[in-house]
Structure formats: structure tokens, C-alpha cells
Image (tube, rainbow, N blue to C red):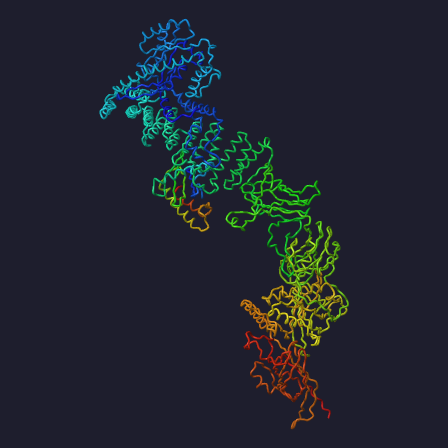
Amino acid sequence: MPRPSLPQKRDFVAKAFCPRILVLSTPTITDACVVNGCAGFADLLAPFGQDISTQITIQDGQGAPYFLDKLTVRFTTDYKIEKHSQQQSRADIDELVHKSVVDDSEQQRIPFLSDGVVDADVVESDDIASWAPWYIQFRQQWLASMQPTEHESFMHPVACMLVASGSEEDPIGALRRLQQQVVVQRVQSQSFSGVSVMFYYLLVHDGRDVGAMQTIDQTFEQVRRTFGQNSALVKINSLTDSAESGDTSDRSKISGIWISSQAAVQPLKPVPHPDTEYGGMLSMRDVAALRDAVKQMMVRSVIPHMQYMIRVLSDQTANQRRGITGRLFSAGRRYFGAAGKTSSVLTGVDGDVYFGYDSPEAQLRKLADYSFMLKDFRFAQTVYQVARRDFQTERAWKCYAGAQEMVGICKLMQEIQATRAEFDSNFDDAVAMYLHKTQTPCLHLAVRCTVIYYELLKHHRLYAFAPPALLRLPASLSALHAMISEQAAYAYLKTPLRPQLRKFSFYAMVASREYQKAGIGELAHRCLRMVRLSLEARLSTSPSPSKDSPNSWLAIESHVNHELGLQCMAAQNYDQALEHFMALMGSDQIPPKLQAKYLQELLQLYLEGSAAADATPMQLSVPFIDAQKVRVIMSPELEGTDEVLLWRRGGAAPSGQSETAGSNACCSVGENVAVLLMVKNPLTVGITLSRFTLDCVFESAAADSGGEDQPEFTVSATDTVVLEGGQTTMVTVTLTPQRAGSLTIKGASYLLCDILPAYKPLVLPGKRLNDTLEQRVTAVYAPETQLEFRVDPAWPRLEATLEEFPDSLMSGSMQRAQLRLTNRGALPCRAVTLWLSHPSFFDVTHPHRNCDDNNAQSAYSYTDSISATEEAEVANVLQDSSMVVVLGGANSLDSAECLEPGNSICVPVWVRGDRVGAHALSIFVGASTAQTASSQLDAIKAVAMRSRRFDVDLVVTPSLRVNAFVRPSMRSPHERIVGIEVENVQAELSVELAQTTFTSGHYELVPLQAHRTNTASKSHGLKVGPRQTVNLMFRAQPLRVAGELQTAPEQFTVDALQQYIFNKDKPTALPKPIKLIYSNAVLGMQGIDCVRSPLQAYILRAQAHRRRSLLRTAFPLIPEEHQPRLFPLYETFSIDFMLFWREIGGSMQAGHHSISGIDLGVPHDYIAAALNPPAAGVARAWLKDTVNERDMLIRSIANRCQSSRRHERPLDVSMQCVQIAESAAKLPKTSDMLYIADVTITVYNHSWRHKYAFKLDLLSPSQLKQRLSATDIKLDFSGARSGWKWLDATHYEMAVAPLDSVQLHTRLACCAPGMIDIALWELYANALDPGDSSNISGMEPDAVTSRSHPVYGPQCVVCRLYPLHPTLVNIKPFIINE
Amino acid sequence: MSVTYYFAIVGAADSPLYEAEFGVQRNENKHLHQFVVHAALDLVEDALFATNSCYLKTIDTYQNLNVSAYVTPSNVRLMLVHEVKSEEAIRAFFAGCHELFVRTLLNPFYDPSMPIQSRAFDAKVNALAKKFLI
């Protein structure tokens, strides 16, 4: 269809309101027309009524001339005013819409909307008509099928054309008969033309009738004479023989005249036969003759007749139109001329008031209509306005509405830019009147009015008025409303300034809904697609595309998607329907009821559609799987955590690799890999997932050649996962790779609700790159590695299981657990290493191959031959106690180099409750297949090993409480009494003590009482009942002589520390082995070997751990890696104690408690000596920081030396009464005897380092008052106790060597027998430098010297000592045998 | 009385920040209400030029649904779909909601283009609706 140009559009309106001519013909004529393919003569003439170029100048209503360019006339064959029933008109409209749509529904193209963009240019330039061609069809047909009504003269015939054939016997008679027909009478009585209707007589000569050829002119002459000037002659059917017509182009041209005319006027009229040839008997000359005849009729007769009528009517109604008089006249007539009024007001067929055709009101209307038909719009408008007023006063609403409509049309037909108020109200009024004020709603008129108005608006490009105008039509007719809404939507697109997209989408949605209701599915779908596109769209001309914010108009979105889905489903387009339905899933904003509905429909849809579509899994947004949270776990069946860690010696826990770029997870061939996925249901309704499995891609390694027939990997599938609304569940899928290569997890596939196969890709961006500028300014991600892992046959696969690990233990008791290590890989595992977080809790012993040999041997090796004192030399090195090499390394527990594939070993792990409380213990097991791993580990390098970490919880309950206390020995100054207090804190169980063992480098400890008293009950040791306390006393006596101690560990520490502080080179030598003395006291039946049994390793390790933690807190500034070269494992003078016990009853657990570092209170505080700079080899420090650092270190060590140790006595004095003799001479004047006692005084030096000079003053009780008043010592020396006195010199100045003693011999005299306390002395000690024996008393810490830093020395360099405990001497009375 | 109100706060980026329905809830109408409001957004700008006040009164109607609008200085639009016309009550309701919205904006953790999910806000808006509309 050619696109109408703009002026044509206005013509469209003029054509709709063109004059009509009633054509009546005789049957002969009809026959003549039928051969030309036309139903009647009116049909034959129809094409020539279009756009007759009249080219005449005529007068308007006021007599002013104007030029009438062309005119259209329409020929009708019947005239009848019919009642339009409401139902019928509705049905008509519906039918019409359906018809017009069905024709052109294939056109699904939406030219202005593409993906996401509205093409503004297309919107601007395109005509609306091309977007919805069916509307044009509808419009044309609608106007063509308009019926005449009583209130307007438009559809009424202006003239009657009577046609007779020249071949008839009596043409005049025939014409007269025609004139007498009922139709003509009806026109004369019931039309606006009335009796004054013009008749036009046409005589047709049929070319086939050769006989009439001669008489035709004569006949016409007769006709003309009879009927006057309004008659004409035309000749048709000159082609008597169709075979003559050789020129086919002429034929088709002639035929085309009718076809195009029919297409334009009545597009929906059914085509009779496609091969019907119009004008088959007509020559070009005939056609021209017909056209000429019509033109002549119009120009010569019809237009002048109409002009005449206009003039006559104009004169008649002039009064009304002219000012106040006219109004007065009409008002007067209204009030006073009652008779005229009643006569003119009639009731029409549909019950509405109208005016008789001869009434002044009707005449006015006729005048206006005629003027309008002749395109004199200005005059017509004034007349309509006058008529409108009259109709209004008479309440003839239909007439009024018609007048209003025409006023508006006239305004718009004049090419004057009108504002809205001037015309919109007219149409608004008109439509409202048509619909609501008339007796029965004149829907057809309202539709006509709206259609015309809309066309005019489009013509004037006043699109803003269009939508409201269109939407005034009632919404009750779905089909019409749909079409109208669609047009309104388009009009919104064409609004000035910018297309109103949202309005467009809204009305397109309304249109779609209405189309759906009307059953026009294709158009409904098209509209909805437009809605969806426009919702996503933005304007192509919009300057900056707004950021892609997610459209959150969810209700709209879901509704559109749902409707589209349903429509696609109805159209059996399952793929698209699925697409739309899937877009619905996944939003939790939709109410649950709808969600459930959508889900149901989706499933149903799939069931229906699956027959057609192949079952390719779809990507659904349900459920939600967070790819970030996907975890890949190797060997999930084993306990513990699988990691690749860096192992290094030095006590620190194996740590994760810091720079691990590109190294992703790795597993061995045949190893199970668990993939954990967090699956979340975003809906609020529950769903089920079944056959949940993973989709993986395997990339074979280049080297791998074998096993082609094997599957590369196997994947397990989870049966059913039920997810409630909003629930998140963890789903585990197990993969087993069978060949070397790399495996990438691409996605998850599952059956949704057992029906819908779905697929979910798991895509992750890798690490955000931040290396280059470009990477920093744009978001660049590394390739994702988290969902990818290598399958490497060389990867160590050591299966480690921790068995029989206890949950709870009594403190001190030992229980056996075991670590079963199996090499499941293809290569031997080397450097199998353990790392223990709490070394004192574990005793790892020699592994054995036979794992099933599970005879629970005891932790202790019992033996009968335990000597009281054993000596053993142990490596005095502070080892790293937390790492234990099981296989293949230096100091490994097992001599084998590696664990061969398939072999397994069991490592017994004794767990000891070292401390009371709840503990979280971790054990790491590491292994490597690399040859160099163990040697690297020995060389204190970091080695990356595959590790398994066990985290276990252990609760240790209290069993025994063991305390040690130290007392000075009265017997000897160099001895101490060590008391052990053992309290059984358990409520029920008794414990028997089996053995005590003291370990020291210097002292031997001898039990003070014999514990094995009861030899009869040998099976039991010393029993400690519940809540009982037992005290064990031991005497500690030095075993060694001073000379052996020159290479003592203490000296090592002093030297090493001094070097460490002041020298540039840090110390490298390790301490020498130490000879330890093990003092055992067997309390039970059998002794426990601590020296040669594996227990010793544990003791050493526990000691090392304890010592390390002690040193860590004592010297926080010394890094841990330097400790083994600064401090020995055992110090010479410390005493360690172990108490072995066994439960009586209960689980018969055995265990031991230990006390480390029992302090005898003797000075071995040697550390301070290291703080003084050595004579030579002080590293020069250039930087202030270095100096500060060193000072800080020195100060911290010095502070500790001064604060931590309690009061010490470097020297001890013991007195012993050797012999008491009666004095030779009696005291004068008394009979009393004087008793003389010889006393040996021993002064013992506890220090191994310093020689002491001392001044010893022996005091007599009488001197006490004056000597001791200065001090706080309160001694009771009164009465008989004070009755003695030192006899010889009481002041001694001597020196004593380290660890040596000096003896003095003196005497005392006592006047009475009895117990006296002779420990009355005062000692002033002063340390001497060991080298030159000079006095170092001046070098006290506080002394400020001229040197840059203070001098540090031992704490008790100068001290004053007093007796600690009494030394009682019993002076027995002598029996004098005289 | 079966009156339905649909209230939406539309952000400057034309996406709804907050939605609520008062009165009789009709589930099937939710999308229609949203559609009407969405379509009326096209008219807000035109209506802005006609007045100086924030309250634009009724700017659009569709069948028996009226759309009233209120534009804040930051071009956040408060839209109300209502069946009954009561200009003053709606003006008061809008003013109250505007204040609530401004208070929400004061929250440093609230991004102005984010949907408002505060339950307190919801409760207060409902209280306002109860006071002025229902």
C-alpha cells in the first residue's frame, strides 16, 4: 500500500464526508456491468468518483468565490436509515477489527525498536500508519461502511442518478419507472435532500448491442427532451470481442482501476474471485468516456445544484446567523412559537430527538454539510456553530454532538494552527454526547469522530492530543480498545521533544491485554514484545547512556515475562516460552504465591515442550550457587585438613605458602576429591534438586600416554537435595580423577524438581591484577584457578589417620594413640615429618611396620635393676622439640629412607596430659616425593610438603598435685633438704607412687627415709588415697668436686651471651654434652628406666620445650633461632624431678609428673656477668640504632637478673660441736662446773664462680643487745640460754674458694648444762674476681663509673649474712665421780 | 471501603527505591499499579514546569486510578496511585514521606540509589498512610 502523503490525509477526511449519489439502474444495465466484473452501475462508476478534478471556481456561502480543485463523490445503490442496535454495532466493530487484523498479522516487524535502543530517527520520520497497517484497514473500512443517520446529511444522497440502457425498448419509460422506485420515494421523504433532490439521467449505450447503435442518438435526444439538461449519454462495452484485445497491458491497466479503487475505499470487502477481470469489455475510450461522464455530471449538474441549495438555504437561515437579531428570533420562536417547535422536533429510529428535514435547524445543518462537502470549511464552521446552539437549546444531543464534531473538524480542516482549547473541547464534547447523552449510545458515531479527529491530529502533528482523544472511547470493546490503545501508544512515541517511552510501554501493555481478550494472539504477542523491548530500551539519541542499573520494576518485568511466556506457550513456541519463564525465576521480590505459580508453570511447560525440544539442560537462575564459596577438598574421607605447607626447622609451625602465584590445588591420581558447593534457594518456595553433579573438563597432561581406555575421571551424583524457601545447603560432590592432567570444574548440572534438567556454570574472576598501570586503571583479573586442580601422579599421597586419640586424660597420665601412615601414591614418600603444637603433650616413639600389632605396651620400661644413682651423658642441646622426623632424615625415628608405595607404618604417639585444662592440639604430618626434601629440611631450608593437619581437643583432668620445697640442711652447709608434697586431688581413685627420679648435673638426692618399708606388699608402692597428701623428703648433696666444673654449661652461656651481645659474629658452637646424675628412688615393686628407655627422648624433648618457653618469656629480645647456641638444655645446678605413679583401680593408667628446675636457693646467677663487655672483640657500632638496640637488650637482661631471683646466700655457715669437756679449772667461788665445748665452724661457698672473702664475727648472747639492735633480728637468748660465751677469737677474716669450704675451730664456754643455740654469728662476705683474687666489691651495679655503661656483676657480691636456723647443742651435765 | 493505594519512591535513576501498598491489597493489581506509576513518570517532567511547588497534584489518570506526584529537590519522585481524590490529604502524606526520606538520606550507610529496606521506614510510612489516607 503506498504511503499517503500529508495533504492526502486531509483529503481522507474530505473524502469521508463527500457527497453521495444514489445510482439506480435498469436490469439491462446491471447485466452490462456484470460482464465487466462489477455488481452494478454504481460499482462501475466507483473508481471515477475518486478525486474528480473539477477545476472550477464556485461561490461560498457569503458569495465570495473560491477554487474547488477536486472533489470525490461516492455512488450508492440504496438509502435507508437503520437503527444501530448497541449489540449489533459492537459486534460489527469486533468483526471489523478481527477482519482487518487477520489480513496483515504477519507483519511482526517493529521497526523502531531494536535490542535495547529506540531508534529516534525512525520514530521521528516514520508514519504511525506503517507500524500498524491493520489500523488503516480498519479505518478505511469503518468509514466506508458508515450508514446515513437522521442528524446529518452526509450519508444522504445529494442526487439520484437514474441509468437506463439505450437498447431498451422504452428508455424514458424505464427511467420514469426508476424514478418511481421506493428508494427514490424514501429519499424524497426521509432525507435531507427531500423533494428538492436532483435527478440525473444517464443513458448508457451497450456496445454489444449493435442493433441499437443507430437509434442511440435518437433515443438520447428523446431523453434529453424529456428530462432536461440533467441527462447524459455514455457508451460502454465497445470491445465486443475480447479476442481482439491484443494489448494485455491495456487490459490490466483498465482492470487495475477498479482493483485499486476497491482496495482504497473498502479494503476488507471480500474479493469475489481472484481471476475476475474488471472492465473486460471496456476499451480505453470507454473508460475515458465514463470518467468524463462523471465529471460532467458533477461539474454541470451536481455542484451547481449544491451551490443553489447553499444559496437558498443561506438566505433562509441568514437571520439566525446574523448577530443578536438571529438569536432573539430563535429565542422568541422558542418561547412564543410553540406550534413550530412541536412540528419540527421528531424522534428518530434509535429514540433520539432530531429535527424534521424541513425545519430551520435541519436546514441549517444541511447548509453547513453542503458547504463542507464543497470544502468551504470556514463558512461551514460558522453555520455549524449556529446550529449547535440551536440543538443545545432543544436538547437534541445527538444533533448537538454532530454539530460539535463538525465544528472541530472544520477548525482543523482549515490550515490554521489551533490551540488545544479551541478544538479539543469540541471533540471531547462530541464523543461524550455520542456516548452518554443520547438515548442509546452512538458508538459508531463516536468511533467515527475519534478516528477522524485522530487523523487530523496526525496531519497537524499534534500527537500530544491523540492519546487522550483515543482513550475517550469506551474500553468495553476489547478489540477496538486494543487497537485504539496501540495507536495511543504510538502517539506517545511521537510526542514532541522526546518519545515518552514509558507511556508507550504502558499502553502497549494495555493493548496487548485487550488483544489477548479479543483473541488476537499474534498482535497481543507483538505488543508485549514491544513492551519488553521498550522497558529495556533507551533512546538512541540520549547523550550518555545511564549506568546500567538493574531494572527494579520487578512487578512489571515479571508480569511481562509471564505473559510473554504464556503467549509463547499458546503459540507452541516452547523455546521462547522457556526463555521467558526462566527470566521469571530467581527473584525473591515476587510474592511467594506467584513464585510457586511460575515454577509450576515452568515445569508444566517443560513437560509439554520436552517432547518437541531435545533435552538440553538450561541455565536457570534457581538455585543460586556462589562460585566464591566452592571448596575443593582432597581425600575427604580422611580426617584433618589437606594443605601444602612450607616446613622448616626451628620450631615454627609449617606455614602456608606466601608467594604461590599460579600454583593451584593438586591431587594424586585415583584420589578422591570432594567439591563442596553452597547452594541457595533464592525463592520463597521450596524446590528439589536431584541428580546433582558437576560438569568438569579434563585436560590430559602431555606426558600422560597410558590408560586411554579409562575414563579420565568419575563424578558422583547426589540423589536429592531439598531446599526450603531461602535455605542454603551444602552439597558435596566427589570427583575421582584417573589420569594425570588438570581438571577444571565448569558448572553444576541437576534436575530441578525431578523434571527440568538445568545447568549452572560456575565462573569466577581470578585475583584482581594490580601490577601495571593499565591493570590498575581497568579491572583486569587473573585467570581463575580456584575451581581448577592438577592431577599429578608424582604428588605425594600419604594417607594419615590418627587412631585411638583420647578425648580426655588425667594430668600426667600417658595414653597411646597411633598415627597410621600409608603411602597410596605411586612414588615413595620421603621426609615424613610430624610437627606438634604442644611437644610436651606427645611422645612419638619408634614406628613399627606391623600396624595390626596392637599390644599396648606401656610407656615406661619397668625393670628390677634400678640403681639409686645413675650417670648418663646427654646432648645438652636445646633442640627443636616440635618437629619430629619419622622417616628419611637426620635424627629420624626410623632408619628407612622412604615409605614405599603401598606400605604403611604406624607411629605410636603417646599422649600425656601435661597440663590441666582443655587444650586444642594440632599435629601436622608432612611428606614429599622429592629426593632432596629431607636434606633440605636438615639444612634449615623451607621445604614445601603436602601436609595434613589434625586438630584435636584434649581435656586434661587433675590427678595429683606435686609441689617441691627446699629447706637448708642442718647437717652440712652445702646440703639442702628437698621436700616433695604429693596431693591426690581425685575424689575416688587411689594412686600408688612407683618411683621418684631426680635429674641434676651437680646434686645427688637421697631419700631421707626408706620408703620400701613394707616388703611384703611389694606389688604396691606408696599408696596415696583420695584427697590424701604424702610428703617425701630428700637430701640434696653435691656429687662433684669443683675442679670438674670448668666446662660447665653456665660458663658456656656466659661466653656465648657475651659474644652474642658484643660481637659482630653470633655464636655458632653448640653446648657440650653434660653428665647428668639420675637419682632414683624406687617406691613400688619395679623401677622405671629413665636413662636407656625411649622415655629419655621424651624427657629431653619435654625439657627442651619447657626450657624454650621459659627462655622465651625471660629473654624476649633474643630471637628463638639463637637460643640453642646461647643456652644449654640443662644447667648444672638445677634439679628436675619426676614422679611416676600408677592408678589403683579405675583404668589402671600410669603416668608421671615432673617438676623442672627446682631452685635450691644457691647463687648460680651468672648471666649478669655476660653483660660486661669483654676485653677485646667488641664490635664497633656505627649506627645509633645498633647501639640503642644493644643497650636495650642489656638492660632487659639485667632487669631480669635483678628482679627474678629471690634472695640468695652465697655462703653458708654450719657449726658443729665436736667435743664437750669439763673445764679443767673450776670457776672460782662457785661449785658450778664450767663446760667447755670445741666447735667446728664450716663456711661453705655455694658459688661456682666466685671466691669469697668473708669476715665472720661470732657473737655471744651478752653481746646480742648491742650488735643486733640495728637489725631486725629478734632472738630469744634469755635465761639459761644466754649462759655461754665464745672463748677464743671471735673475729675471723678468711677467704673461701668456689664450691669449697673452710673450717674453723673454736671453743665456747657454758656455765650450765642444757640445750643452747650456738648459731650466733654475723658474716660479711665479699666476692673476689676469680682471676686475680682482687676485691670486686666496688663493682656494684649501682656504682657509677667513668665508663659509658654500668658494670654488671653477680647479685650477692657483697652481703651480710645471719644465721638462718638455730644450731642446738646439748650440753650434758657431767657426772663427777669423785 | 475497598480503596487501594500504591505508593512508590522513584530514585533519580528511575528505579523504585521503595514500594508499598495500603488499604485493600489486591495481588493481581500490583503490576498494573507499577505500570501506571512507571508510565506516569513520563508526565512528571512536564508537570514540573507548570508549578513551583514540590507537590504536582494529580498528573495522570488511567481508568479509575489517579497518579499524584511529589518531586523532591534531588529529583526523587514520590508517586501515589489512588482511587479517591483528596488533594490535601495526599499533600500531607507526601510531605511526611519526604521528611522520612530525608532522614533516611542522613544515614551515612545509605546510598541514595539503593532500595530502602529499613523496617522502621516502612512502619512509619504505613503509619502516615493510616493517618492521612485510609
Residue A338 spot, x, y in % from top left: 25, 21
Can you name the residue that lies furthest to the bottom here? Answer: A1229
Residue B46 spot, x, y in % from top left: 37, 38
At 49% from the left and 36% from the top, the residue drawn is: A115
- Give the quarter of the figure containing the N terminus of chain A: top left
> In the depicted view, which residue is nearer to us: A543 or A616?
A543
Q: Is residue A1255 above or below residue A1186?
A: below
Residue A1272 spot, x, y in % from top left: 57, 80
Judge whether residue A744 can be spotted in this image.
yes
Splitting the image into 4 quarters, where does residue A1361 fall?
bottom right
Q: Is residue B24 above or below residue A1280?
A: above
- Give the quarter of the figure containing the C terminus of chain A: bottom right
Residue A112 spot, x, y in % from top left: 45, 33
> In the depicted view, which residue is nearer to us: A1314 or A829?
A829
Judge whether residue A440 can be spotted in this image.
no
Splitting the image into 4 quarters, where does residue A337 fall?
top left
Q: Is residue A1132 above or below residue A27?
A: below
Splitting the image into 4 quarters, where does residue A659 fall?
bottom right
